[in-house]
Amino acid sequence: MPKRRSIYASVLVVLATTALAQGTTKKPEPTTGTVSGSVTCADTNAPARFAVVTLERMPEEVSESGKKDKEGSAMNPTATTDMEGRFFLDKVPVGHYYAVGRLAGYLNPLARFSEQQLQKMSDDTRKELAKAVPMVSVGANQGATVSLRLEHASELSGTVLYDDGSPAVGLEIKLLHKDKDGKLVDLKMGAVSGLGLFGEGADTDDRGHYRMIGVPSGEYAISATLPMQNVSLGGLFGGESLTVVNQEGSGLSIYYGDVYRKKDAKIAKVGEGDQVGGLDITIAGNGLHSIHGMAVAKLDGHPVSRAHVELLYADDRELVRTEEIGRENEHEDGSFEFSYVPVGQYILRLVDAIDIEKIERHEFNSNFTDEKLIRRYDVAELPITVQADVNGVELAAPDIPVNKAAAQ
């Protein structure tokens, strides 16, 4: 009898152990492989030391069964080369990748493609990518190799000065690329971030110099923007923090060629590996003026509570700058101001004008302010000529017509 009890107890222990093992069994890891290779600099044939190599997964492709391949990690496998320019990536999810190398001073091959091209991959884009970027296929428990060759990047540089010869310090420099239709569009710098002294743009240094590395070949306009900022400093000697608030859309841009309009900008051409200097900009202090005004209701002349004021060029209605009324204690009296406006013909346009009522309430030992919409206004426009400072402008917003209000 004791022997049977011993056998029975042993069986229970085995069953319990098996059940515990089954309950704690881990799910198998996704099937992976490895990628190794080397990176060299095309101009020197030397190893690209401490370059960053990233595997960019190709867009989802439809398999023969008609299903999309969704395997793989959300993070791009990335490695840094050693002193011999070699790299190794372990546990790379199975799939097809573009191998991209990045090193300061060398061109990111993806920079020549727009974000839209990369997101909506056309057959033409795929063919261009295949020529510019090496591809690698990773198989299950297999090792793949790839060699990268980095082309020396193009460079644009210049100096921004005021007309008295002093350097324009800390101004934002931007590039506008001429697209295939001949239009100047903002160059998205995300693809070339880290390739030099710029990400989304560059700033002039203490001597007014700027230098942009990693620029794809093409034709460019260059702009320098005067900052429009609200600055508050706590404490006489800066004992508290410094707060800088940028007024979006309100800065004045001066283009290469010393002009204020994008369409008049001088164009700089750059080829693969070119170093183009002397792209200087001079900012004239004279000839810039300000516009001061008030946005009011046309019916009775009271200041509107909220609105946007747009400054447009009169000839083609290109937007110059915008000003917001009534937000965060700014211009709550309906007033607006545009600084540093060049001589010319303009249109002031008032949009999204409304009246609100502020309602104070006290709850949970705290004070709250609610806003109630009282009235909406229609668009208002006013032609204006700037030859000197312009003061006392009244931009009157009409009531919305009954049929238009009903539609809204």
Image: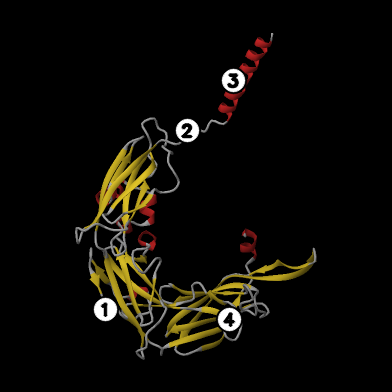
Q: In this rendering, which labeled residue sits more in front, label 3 or label 2? A: 3
Q: CA–CA distance between discs 3 and 2?
A: 24 Å
Say which label, 1 or 2, has the lower sequence index: 2
Instruction: Name which residue lies at 35% across and 46% down.
Output: 89
Say which label, 1 or 4, has the lower sequence index: 4
Q: CA–CA distance between discs 4 and 3?
A: 73 Å
* Mark 3 secondary-structure assignment: helix
Drawn side of residue 2 relative to residue 64, left or right: right
Q: CA–CA distance between discs 1 and 4?
A: 37 Å
Give the residue type that dot 4 points to: Leu
Direction front: furthest residue = 2
Q: Which mark is residue 98?
A: none
Residue 250 at x, y percent in the picture: 49, 76
Q: Which residue is mark 2?
A: 28
Q: Which residue is mark 4?
A: 233
Q: CA–CA distance between discs 2 and 4?
A: 57 Å
* Mark 1 secondary-structure assignment: loop
- Residue 200 appears in the rendering: yes
Q: Which residue is mark 1?
A: 278
Give the residue type that dot 2 points to: Pro
Q: In this rendering, which labeled residue sits more in front, label 2 or label 4? A: 2
Residue 227 at x, y percent in the picture: 46, 78
